Image (cartoon, rainbow, N blue to C red):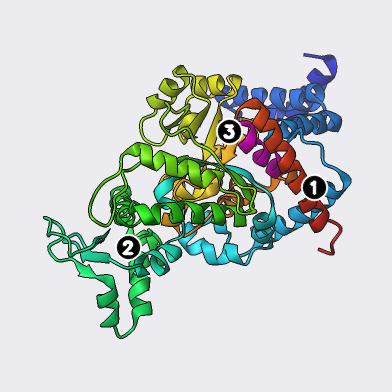
Amino acid sequence: MSGLFKKDFHSHFQSPMTLQDKMVFPSRGSYTITLQLVVVMCCVTVCGGTPDPRQRETMMRQETSRQTGGRVQLTEAEQWLDAHLHKLKEQEMAAAQFPPAIHFFKARPLIHKSPIFNLLQRMPKGAALHIHSSSLVSVDWLVKNITYRPHCYICFTWGRSVRFVFSSRRPFPTWDCLYWQLLKTLRANMVDPTDFDNSLMQNLTLFTDDPDTTYPSQDAVWERFEMAFVAIAGLVTYAPVFKDFLYKGLEQLFDDNIMYLELRTGLSRTYELDGSIHDKAWSLRTYQEVGREDRGRPLWFFREALSLPAELGMGTEVDENILDALMFNTTRIGHGYTLAHHPLAKELSRKGNVAVEVCPISNQVLKLVSDLRNHPAAVLMSEGHPIVVSSDDPSLFGTTGLSYDFYEVFVGIGGLRANLGTLKELAINSIRYSSLPSQLKERGLAMWQRTWDKFISENSYRNP
């Protein structure tokens, strides 16, 4: 103890110790506590000093550089748009209702009004790497186009769902479909066919105005999820519809500024009007035919559907599946929702440059997370772990394309730190971590860069 400190210490306690007749002398225990507090306060004041603000700024720059897009160098035009986006995001975060914090079914009308969402719709997003084939096309098109085609039959099941089938004659009854009706005849007897069509759409999607009441548990939402898939299957596996369905899906992706698709499909067998069934090879040929068609729209379609997939859908149910996927040398992990809870797996995937396919709306609707600001991908983004954004089953959630999921990632999961560099890296990642050969990746990135530059030039230097 220094001489100065001893002097100050004794002068501080001199009065209480000489006035024993007026004050109770502190007990040994309380005296010891007082001494320790004085020593600690002294050390903080004398020994610690004031932190160097330059060190703090350096640490903050280092942390920012580690996040997704943190090392992306922005041009002057990109910096202007980035500053504009930042202002827009601050305004949305200060609003009474913040879309990423509430269920997507309730947030969708708010997102529609968002200038950020409007900008994201115009932004070239690269590739969609995690979309299931049955939910590729909007239910609005399914009902208003496919169900109006000739020979379409419908039945209402005991489980309060619907089934569809195309047939040259009335289908035979089954255990869950006792009575099939021709849709054309049924609509002709309807007072309001539009209201009937809306009810059909409700059977092909999970969308509802009150999701918390409709889906009180994961079991409830998964049951409805599976029922919708079965209902859609009868429509889209009809061979004459199959090709139109695929092309419409590519068209809707193109309209959302997506240039490339890797489709997740089980290659369901398709059927003809007479009930005959095609094998999986027929379905694969149809995929290839649709993918080669240009029709003036440079949208790529690619999937080696019969080969062992290099992308494994893991991480939403059984945690150990993530380690299994990495042991199989996977190139991407589907969802990877629990990856942040497994330090070893997270380290291995980052070092192995294995991207995680993040599908935020799917995770929220299927009740894995309620507030997307708490999504585990926030940790991955802060550490710069490779991720790509996708939409999983967009039509079931009342969406198409990727713009809604990009909004949730950019505004909700990424928070205020996510910037234009984040969006740019996410789009590049979608091509970088695709299944394309190296040469085609280079071509794809060059194509994307041209559309990106055009997007920047059209959306910079405007009045906020």
Residues at circles 2 and 3 in contact by the CB criterion of under 8 Å: no
To which residue does mark 1 refer? 453
Amino acid at dot 2 = Asn
Q: Residue 310 in the image: x percent, y percent?
A: 48, 26
Does 424 appear in magenta?
Answer: yes
Front residue of 122 and 118: 122
Q: Residue 439 in the image: x percent, y percent?
A: 67, 28
* Disc 2 to disc 1, C-alpha distance: 42 Å
Earlier-in-chain disc, 2 versus 1: 2
To which residue does mark 2 refer? 203
Is 5 on the left-hand or right-hand side of 317? right
SS label for mark 3 = loop
Extent of the magenta region: 421-434
Q: Residue 357 in the image: x percent, y percent?
A: 52, 37
SS label for mark 1 = helix
Above or below, 14 against 399 in this view is above
Earlier-in-chain disc, 3 versus 1: 3
Q: Residue at x 45, y 56 (%)?
A: 244
Does 436 appear in magenta?
Answer: no
Can you see residue 21?
Answer: no
